[in-house]
Image: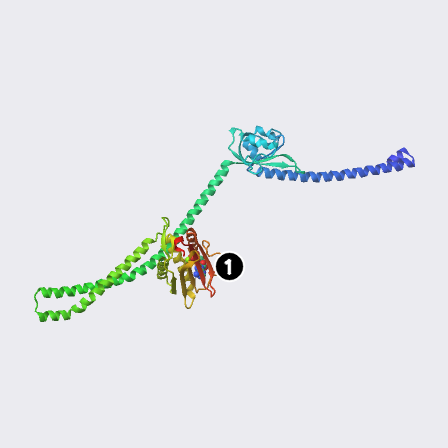
Amino acid sequence: MSGFGELEGGGFQDESWVAVIHKMEEVYSDLIRYEVDLEGKNAALEEAQSFIDSVLSSMSDAFIVCDLDGRIEQVNAAAARLVGRRRADLVGLPLKDLLIDASGKLLARLDGPVADGECGPDQPECEVRLNGPDGPTDALAMNCSDRLDRAGRRVGLVLIGRPVGELRRAYQALNLAHADLKRAQMQLVQAEKMASLGRLVAGVAHELNNPISFVYGNIHALDRYRGRLAAYLAAIHAGVDEREREALRRDLGIDALMADLSSLIEGTLEGAQRVGDIVKNLRRLTFAGGGEPERVDLAQMVATAVHWAERGHRQRADITLDLADGLWVRGHAGQLHQVVVNLVQNALDAVAETPRPRIAVSVGRAGGKVRLTIADNGPGIAADHLLKVFDPFFTTKPVGSGTGLGLWISYGIVRDHGGVIEVANGPEGGARFTVTLPAPEEEVG
Ligand SMILES: Nc1ncnc2c1ncn2[C@@H]1O[C@H](COP(=O)(O)OP(=O)(O)O)[C@@H](O)[C@H]1O
Ligand SMILES: [Mg+2]
């Protein structure tokens, strides 16, 4: 390295040359370091650039960035495709060359925030069309926001647009899915209604069986009596003598028959009357809902519902009714009936394993309202289930025995009647359901 020094000769120059050469070496190695540094940064920059590029080109929304003079700085592939030009050709062009329709509002954004509802910060969506290769493109829902520099100054706009048609299609698909769901839900509700109707019909069938069977029995007895009376009359018409007639009267049991006749007829009438009453009650149950709300006598409605629910259920229990008279609500008897049937059936299900099963049903006033409670001495409801029992499909019963819709439907019916249905565990265990309904004003003392 001392080659220069030797050529020139002289110790002092040698030393200064050495210093210069050292300096040069330092500068040279600095340079190399800078270069390596620079290459690293360049690579990072290129990576960042290609990352941004890949994100931009994978966006299906059109993306346009412009400066405050309205010159395009960046577009993505989707935007370039929409207007049918190359990305590079678009950079530097005035934004307004691309826009038609609402361009006025959009371009006003370059001068600062615009009034609400016009593609401003509070309502960024506005609809614009772009100048496409074959005339105006489909409308785009355009989202427009300010681009800020590091110091927070506005330096341009960022526009993101999505073809409205696509949004509409997505919306339509969503709507269809929603309608499907609603249909499925209605079918399920219908299925639960049919199931509870089925249970009800079982109850009614039991109920009808009793009077019908004794009407049958009575009619058979009457038929036998008719035969005996006919034989007796035939003998009289044939003019038999008194002795023979008396013998016949005794043998045919005519006196006992006559004494029995009126109670037979009364009993038959009473049976027919009971069948008539049951049918009348059934008629009142309009399960379809709808119709004008009517005056519903609570005690009567609850009594029939409890009775039928009990008849339609395999499980027996000691059911006590404490029903205040003269209380009524405005609503749909059939629907309220369904609520009571559901609650009693649940209570009967609940006491299946209880040694001395009991269910207490009561109707009374509570402040300005009327209150119905149904309490059982079953196992009650687990604390973490208390909030869930009204959810659709919540059931703890085995598949096939529970749909988990009974309480959900009851909840809806009570709500539609302006009331609330609540559940709690009783102080001595067992579940207690309370239905509170508004009482018509003139009824509240
Ligand atoms: N009286 C009750 N005692 C204990 N649990 C009850 C009672 N009533 C309702 N439940 C609980 O609430 C759940 C939901 O009831 P419900 O909506 O009528 O549907 P399902 O009777 O078909 O199961 C039942 O599965 C049961 O776990
Ligand atoms: Mg149920």
Inspect this view and state whether residue 397 appears: no
SS category of the residue bearing label 1: helix
Q: Position of residue 228 (x, y in %)?
A: 16, 66
Point 12% across, 64% down: residue:
233
| Image quadrant in which the N terminus is located | top right
Horizontal side of 165 relative to 342 (left or right) equals right
Dot 1, crowdedness within 10 Å: few (<14), some or many (≥20)?
few
Q: Is residue 206 above or below residue 412?
A: below
Q: Position of residue 86 (x, y in %)?
A: 58, 31
Query: How is the structure coloured here?
Result: rainbow
Picture mark count:
1
Point 83% across, 38% down: residue:
23
Location of residue 155 (image quadrant) = top right
Q: Position of residue 116 (x, y in %)?
A: 56, 36
Location of residue 215 (image quadrant) = bottom left
Q: Amino acid at mark 1?
A: Asp
Inspect this view and state whether residue 102 appears: yes
Point 48% across, 38% down: residue:
168
Farthest right residue? 10
Q: Which residue is mark 1?
A: 384
Q: Position of residue 83 (x, y in %)?
A: 55, 31
Q: Nearer the viewer, residue 436 or 159?
A: 436
Q: Is residue 179 above or below residue 13?
A: below
| Image quadrant in which the C terminus is located | bottom left
Under 8 Å from ligand 1: the CB of mark 1? no
Q: Quadrant of ligand 1?
A: bottom left
Farthest front residue? 445
